[in-house]
């Protein structure tokens, strides 16, 4: 039963030092249940909270069960109604009993709520509830519509044509993101191969394709790094690959999927590493479920900055993908603290008599406000924190450029700040290893066709807090940088990616580089997963 207490505690805790809500769950100390379970129950319950509020209030369980709070009641009733395994607690546990004593009334109120909305399917019901929530929270309908559910087809096990004929056979294919109006609509992306978008609230996680690893939930922007690195030429990739900051594994499995779609890839090994041994377990599980074991070698607990360039395992590495820890400032609302609309503890169902129990709910108001807050834009991180992150990010990229056979490197962040993006690029280009090794930015006309069409490019200056930051890059170099902005019409969060290519092999570069030992553990600033809970970005 720790699951529900810990979920409620995390929801009502003051905001942490930074990073996404998901990353703060996975970095939380002392959890007695898996972070994946905690994150899942919170995010799934938040999709139904308005309906759950209605069911809880009309069934009047809060006035009868002293152990329940509004937030606990929503989490518990969600699992009672929607989880295949039901409430995650033994039958004798008081909280489970508090719900099951009223199971007939709860089910009846759920049926009434569904009938009132005239929804015949669960997908339509969820879409209706999400639309009601948007109105209740005063969210702009257009901007909310443009945060779809992105789904990547895994070429190791399937392909786009097969999935459109099977998993999405009953879906209507639309011509733009703005046309994703109904729960059974699907849009085939124009920028990234084998990527589709579903309407907000569309849930494909119960499909057999999802559980078999044929489709993977991955935000569109996070598909850019692997696609930028490998390109779209239909030929054999020459050499091995490294994913230096790999957990939970979406980008590693995307590399494998792109290789699988080529004519040949048998000679390529993807070395996928993460400094955390716990996260490496998740990484290995994702690789296995995606069917990428033959392509991927997981180096559990391997700190990328501690990798020796002279290690014979890496002598044929020609491409590296780097997505290190960052501020997470580009992560959009779906991955931030969910906003719960909770039951009123004083509300009584009109056909029941009031009970005389006195109940202590001193913390309920605080819990309600904390769980439904987070509506304002977060303050930018301090300059010192961004500088520390940028220092680590630059070290990681410079270390990658020192691999003796490397010819391509991609660097990405889920940050909107110039300090972690264009200024890191400028610093790397000025470094000894870049200049000695003949490294430069991949020009826009050298990028894969789909990404050439992407309109958002690098920026020259940006105000952060009270300071203005400017970067010394040419117009061509800025045009080589790819940016995504949250809240626009492209349906992504904030993201940045740039590619480096090597004009000359720069013999002896690796030997001239100083040995580096550093911690490259992704900490509270990323969206890693500690335990398998399905493919998700």
Image: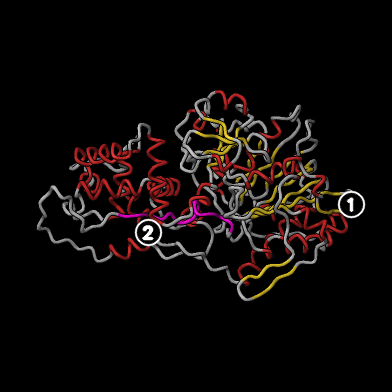
**Residue at (25%, 57%) from the top-left corner?**
344
Quarter holding the C terminus is top right
**Count of numbered circles on the image:** 2
The magenta segment: 330-342
Q: Residues within 10 Å of mark 2 (few under 14, many from 20)?
A: many
Residue 307: percent from left, percent from top? 71, 51
Circle 1 SS class: loop
* Front of the two marks 2 and 1: 2
Name which quarter of the figure residue 395 lies in: bottom right
Q: At which x and y percent is residue 378?
A: 52, 65
Residue 357 shown in magenta: no
Mostly what secondary structure, the magenta segment? Answer: loop
Residue nearer the viewer, 5 or 468: 468
What residue is at 21 percent from the left and 39 percent from the top? 103
Is 121 or 92 nearer to us in this picture?
Answer: 121
Scheme of colours in the image: secondary structure
**Can the viewer see residue 33 in this picture?**
no
Q: Mark 1: few, some, or many residues within 10 Å (few <14, many ≥20)? A: some
Sequence order check, earlier mark of 2 and 1: 2
* Marks 2 and 1, how far apart at CA: 55 Å
> Which quadrant holds residue 269?
top right
Query: Whole-percent x and y of residue 518?
Result: 67, 60
> Where 345 sits versus 268, above or below?
below
Tag of residue 371: 2
Give the SS element for disc 2: helix
Query: Which mark is on residue 506?
Result: 1
């Amino acid at each position: 039963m720790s699951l529900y207490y810990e979920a409620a505690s995390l929801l009502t805790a003051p905001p942490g030092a930074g990073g996404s809500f998901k990353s703060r769950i996975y970095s939380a100390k002392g959890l007695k249940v898996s972070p994946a379970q905690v994150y899942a129950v919170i995010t799934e319950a938040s999709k139904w909270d308005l309906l759950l509020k209605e069911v809880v209030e009309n069934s009047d369980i809060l006035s009868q069960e002293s152990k329940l709070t509004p937030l606990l009641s929503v989490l518990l009733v969600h699992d009672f109604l929607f989880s295949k395994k039901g409430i995650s607690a033994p039958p004798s546990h008081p909280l489970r009993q508090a719900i099951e004593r009223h199971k007939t009334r709860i089910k009846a109120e759920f049926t009434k709520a569904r009938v009132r909305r005239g929804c015949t399917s669960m997908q339509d019901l969820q879409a209706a509830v999400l639309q009601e929530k948007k109105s209740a929270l005063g969210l702009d309908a257009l901007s909310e519509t443009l945060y779809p559910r992105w789904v990547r087809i895994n070429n190791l096990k399937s392909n786009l044509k097969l999935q459109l004929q099977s998993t999405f056979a009953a879906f209507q294919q639309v011509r733009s993101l703005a046309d994703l109006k109904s729960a059974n609509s699907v849009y085939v992306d124009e920028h990234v191969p084998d990527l589709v978008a579903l309407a907000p609230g569309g849930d494909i996680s119960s499909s057999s394709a999802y559980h078999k690893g044929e489709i993977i939930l991955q935000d569109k922007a996070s598909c850019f790094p692997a696609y930028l690195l490998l390109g779209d030429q239909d030929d054999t990739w020459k050499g091995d690959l490294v994913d230096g900051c790999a957990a939970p594994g979406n980008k590693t499995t995307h590399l494998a999927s792109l290789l699988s779609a080529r004519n040949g890839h048998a000679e390529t090994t993807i070395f996928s590493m993460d400094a955390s041994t716990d996260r490496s377990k998740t990484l290995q599980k994702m690789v296995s479920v995606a069917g990428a074991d033959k392509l991927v070698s997981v180096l559990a607990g391997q700190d990328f900055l501690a990798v020796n360039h002279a290690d014979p395992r890496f002598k044929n590495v020609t491409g590296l993908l780097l997505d290190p820890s960052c501020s997470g400032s580009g992560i959009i609302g779906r991955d931030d603290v969910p906003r719960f609309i909770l039951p009123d503890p004083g509300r009584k169902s009109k056909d029941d008599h009031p009970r005389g129990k006195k109940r202590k709910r001193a913390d309920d108001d605080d819990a309600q406000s904390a769980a439904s807050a987070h509506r304002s834009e977060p303050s930018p991180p301090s300059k010192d924190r961004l500088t520390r992150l940028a220092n680590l990010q630059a070290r990681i990229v410079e270390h990658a450029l020192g691999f003796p056979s490397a010819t391509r490197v991609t660097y990405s962040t889920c940050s909107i700040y110039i300090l972690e993006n264009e200024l890191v690029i400028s610093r790397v280009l000025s470094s000894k290893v870049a200049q000695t090794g003949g490294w430069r930015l991949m020009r826009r006309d050298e990028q894969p066709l789909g990404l050439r069409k992407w309109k958002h490019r690098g920026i020259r200056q940006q105000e952060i807090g009270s300071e203005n930051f400017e970067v010394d890059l040419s117009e061509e170099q800025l045009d080589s940088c790819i940016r995504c902005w949250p809240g626009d019409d492209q349906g992504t969060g904030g993201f940045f990616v740039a590619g480096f290519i090597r004009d000359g092999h720069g013999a002896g570069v690796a030997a001239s580089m100083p040995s580096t030992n550093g911690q490259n553990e992704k900490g509270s600033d990323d969206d890693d997963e500690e335990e398998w809970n399905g493919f998700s970005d």
